[in-house]
Amino acid sequence: MQSEWVLKNLIIEIGKRIWSRGYVAANDGNITIKLNEKEILTTPTGVSKGFMTHDMILKVDYAGNLLTGNSKYKPSSEMKMHLEIYKERPDVSSVVHAHPPYCTSFAVAGIPLDKCVLPEAIIVIGAVPIAKYGLPSTMEVPDSIRPHIKSSDAILLENHGAITLGTDLLNAYYKMETLEHTANIVWNAMQLGNLNVLPEYERDRLLALRNNYNLQGRVNVCDSSSSRNIDKKNMLSNRKLVHDKITEDSIEKITQEILKKLKADKSE
């Protein structure tokens, strides 16, 4: 078992990583690690995750009460959310909450990342649901994620961000990377006009691989239907219509400007 000192250093390192990768801005995000069945390490509220120091990492009990740490700092304002996860999932030892731009965009758009697209994502995080919006730092957030905690290690928070759960901090952080990487690729594919969904047969083969790897954690089975595939031909056709309309309007505007200039010159 890793020492408290080592775990605090790891929180600082992961904080730098989520900040440097643009997963959080300013003082956003929070990280926790279970020390034992009575104590939890947490990041402080109101501090950039990219600039944390050892004395900023706090220790709280399972009610969120501060046990040890610098009195200048207070535990994460989202501690209620982390405590709810540890209560519902005894197998989880760490939680990462961040606002990565692509997966948060899907959360804002109300689109779950539940399609069978990337093999690694199917195996590692499965179908990622969206929890209903809850006011940050209140019990509304724990209440909103409760229906999803027991079945998923990655959850989008409507109009807010994302959380990932892990057997340790690195495990939780890697799931956040996988989640954002997947969202980025799905977004790019949508811009190209088509989201190629893997069929049920391939999905089941990938889930069998997951079982063979004996991966811990929970994943929802992703959707292998192609009902939401984007018609690339129609999208490209619509883009052409928009482009043609813009071009037509531009030509008309330029023509009117030339005629106006000619008329002015003639009158002189």
Image: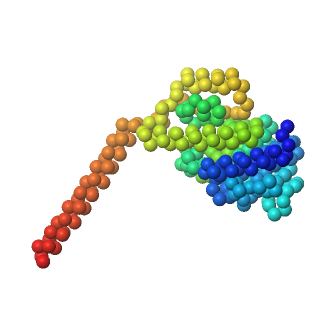
Q: Nearer the viewer, residue 107 or 192?
A: 192
Determine the image quadrant of residue 123: top right
Would you say 262 lies left or right of 17 here?
left
Which residue is pictured at 61% across the width and 48% down the height? 21
The percent coordinates of residue 213 (x first, y second) are 69, 24
Placement of 62 over or under 189, stated as above or below: below
Task: Identify the residue shown where x is 78% and y is 51%.
Answer: 42
Which residue is outermost to the bottom? 268
Residue 89 image point, x, y percent? 77, 38
- Which residue is more in the foreground, 16 or 96? 16
On the image, the x and y values in percent for residue 69 come to 85, 56
Q: Does residue 200 appear in the picture of this structure?
A: yes
Number of numbered discs overlaid on the protein picture: 0
Applied colour scheme? rainbow
Q: Say if residue 110 shows up in the picture.
A: no
Quarter of the figure that contains the N terminus? top right
Residue at image point 58% right, 36% down: 114
- 96 left or right, relative to 33: left
* Residue 97 coordinates in the image, percent (x, y): 69, 48
Q: Considering the image in quadrants, where does the C terminus appear?
A: bottom left
Which residue is found at the position 72% from the left and 33% from the top?
217
Q: Is residue 141 left or right of residue 250?
A: right
Q: Quadrant of residue 220?
A: top right
